[in-house]
Image (spheres, rainbow, N blue to C red):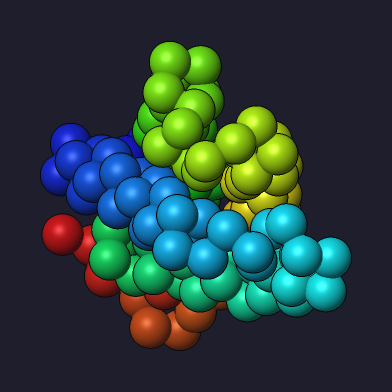
Amino acid sequence: MLRYGQGVILAGLGIVFWAAALAWVRAIPMALTDPAWNILNFAGAVSVAWTCVLLIRRVAGLAPDQLMAGMGLVGAVAMTLDGAVLNWAPRMYGPDDTVTRLAAGWLLWGYGLSLAIALAMARAGRRRPSAATPSGDGVTPP
């Protein structure tokens, strides 16, 4: 179960990550439209997703059993913003439908990667208890 403060932090991170992805798409649309850049953009998303999950876990102070709930909240906020903007203001993503469609695909790819990475980290965290705390969850109780 997430604490209220964690929920606020996670919702804020969802907004920040959504805004960062939007800024990337707006700044460099060729990262989506050029075939070579597109492949690099999708490949690069793996390390970005991994870093985001690590940041989310660290900034919100999530225990392994909270990681999926935390990622779910971050993803829900970011995906809700994406869905609303893609429906009512698609030009925020780019000048034409091609950029908007490719941005939507890249964003879905990133969300899927992030959730898969979080699941792997959560499962690994449950299998290897930390000696740092008596409960073995690696997170110091509040």
- Near-viewer residue (11 or 129): 11
Above or below: residue 134 compared with residue 126: below
In the foreground, 71 or 48? 48
Left or right: 72, with 56 as reference point: right
Rendered view: 116 above or below 103? below
Q: Could you say where residue 80 lies in the image, as x and y percent from the top left? A: 44, 25
The image position of residue 40, as x and y in percent, is 75, 75
Q: Is residue 85 above or below residue 16?
A: above
In the image, residue 57 lies at what x, y percent?
40, 63
Q: Is residue 137 visible?
A: no
User: From this viewpoint, is residue 28 visible?
Assistant: yes
Seen at 45% across and 54% down, the residue is 26
Quarter-of-image position of residue 37: bottom right
Q: Residue furthest top?
A: 88
Q: Quadrant of the N terminus?
A: top left
The percent coordinates of residue 71 (x first, y second) are 49, 46
- Is 3 placed left or right of 48 in the picture? left
- Above or below residue 135? Residue 91 is above
Residue occupying the point 83% across, 74% down: 36
Q: Is residue 107 left or right of residue 94?
A: right
Q: Which quarter of the rendered picture does the C terminus lie within? A: bottom left
Where, by quadrant of the figure, is residue 108 drawn? top right
